[in-house]
Amino acid sequence: MATIIHLSAIHTSSPSIRLFSSHSPQNTPNPSFNLPTKAPTFRSISLKPYIASKPRASVITSAVQSLSETELVTVPEEVEIAGKLPAETGVYAVFDQNGELQFVGLSRNIAASVLSHRKSLPELCYSVKVGVVDEPDRAVLTEAWKSWMEEHIKATGKVPPGNESGNATWVRKPPPRKKKSDLRLTPGPNVQLTVPLEELIDRLVKENKVVAFIKGSRSAPLCGFSQKVVGILENQGVDYESIDVLDEEYNRGLRETLKKYSNWPTFPQIFVNGELLGGCDILSSMQEKGELASFFKK
Amino acid sequence: MGVTKEQVKSSLTSKLNPAHLEVIDTSGGCGASFAIEIVSEQFEGKRLLERHRLVNSSLEEEMKEIHALSIKKALTPEQWKQQQESQVSKPAA
């Protein structure tokens, strides 16, 4: 079922966690959505040659409303996006200022994907249509995407420019943060430190805007809480540094020293602008309240 | 043997005088993992971080044995009341 967003009806000041629940009663809460463990998996699918006569399974086309019936919504300001677009799985169509369809995408987190498009292509992201897919099954999602693409092609005879094969504008550029490696506190196990660990930690958190001290690496977190934190940060598109507190080779002694430094007993720990923001629970509550987007923008 | 749910409860009760307290043993019996919902007047005017610090320090002794402590909610009585009310109308929250 497609979700139509009524911008005027949403109270961003409301502390309610499910901002969308009252507007899309058919959209039953999906508990797994509260635990994003993956980065927004935004895929641009190169379009296969369209065969007009190819029949589609009618069951699946009902996963979202048709493109033309879906309400067009102006892309909200970055700080408001978290409250106004669903951070859920579905399809979205991006239009430019002239109302030209530029791109149809599918995402596990529509709000995050649209936000990242808006960042990289502000001139092409004027408004958006959103269709939430209730069953975040890959096949259903792809079908929903196809149904919008086919509808558009049928109506205009054109593939949205952003979906043309070879057009890499909308595909996330090789994301630097994906390749980002974890920070290391010391140059190696046998290097005599000239400054105390506390000072190294202090420098590290002050020189980097967002630092996550996690168990394991960012690409393979070793504890559920660290994984959740990495997932949230990735989802929010935060440019953050990570450091593995279990790395005895390069970060020996970090665990104990950091606990004292931050006066916080557990990991992960997230620092923003040199200050401890908190652990996994705090980050999750902030995300649920929709406070994170504006917080990390500062 | 780890910490019991009752120990966690009594430490929090004596130190934070909570208006509402729920301790869930999420360890499956070994007493090393708990989830907590706590409502206390002492949280008034404090940031989430400070609230969590209060809870953590109240459980200083227990924390040595606890492996994972998840603070699901740390609210003031007023926030709790609001949340209770909004939950009645919005089961999704």
Image (cartoon, coloured by chain):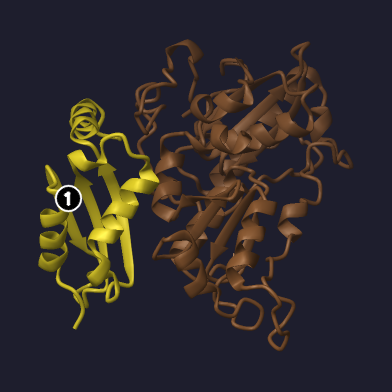
Chain colours: A brown, B yellow
Secondary structure type for disc 1: helix
- Rendered view: A115 above or below A198: above
Drawn side of residue A149 relative to residue A245, left or right: right
Residue A56 visible from this viewpoint: no
Give percent across and percent down for residue A220.
Answer: 59, 69
Drawn side of residue A55 relative to residue B43, left or right: right
Which quadrant does the C terminus of chain A fall into? top right
Give percent across and percent down for residue A9.
Answer: 43, 13
- Rendered view: A88 above or below A94: below
Give percent across and percent down for residue B63.
Answer: 28, 70
Which residue carries the number 1 mark?
B16
- The residue nearer to you, when weighing A142 against A56, is A142
- The residue nearer to you, when weighing B57 against B32, is B57
Q: Quadrant of residue B84?
A: top left
- The residue nearer to you, when weighing A218 against A108, is A218
Residue B90 visible from this viewpoint: yes
Q: Quadrant of residue A169?
A: top right
From this viewpoint, which residue is outermost toward the right? A166
Residue drawn at (58%, 27%) of the image = A79
- The residue nearer to you, when weighing A12 against A260, is A260
Q: Chain of mark 1?
A: B
Local crowd size for mark 1, using a 10 Å CA cut-off: few (<14), some (14–19), many (≥20): some
Residue drawn at (66%, 60%) of the image = A204
Give percent across and percent down for residue A84.
Answer: 51, 24
Q: Quadrant of residue A187?
A: bottom right
- Rendered view: A251 above or below A91: below
* Amino acid beneath label 1: Leu
Circle count: 1
Residue drawn at (62%, 34%) of the image = A297
- Rendered view: B47 above or below A70: below
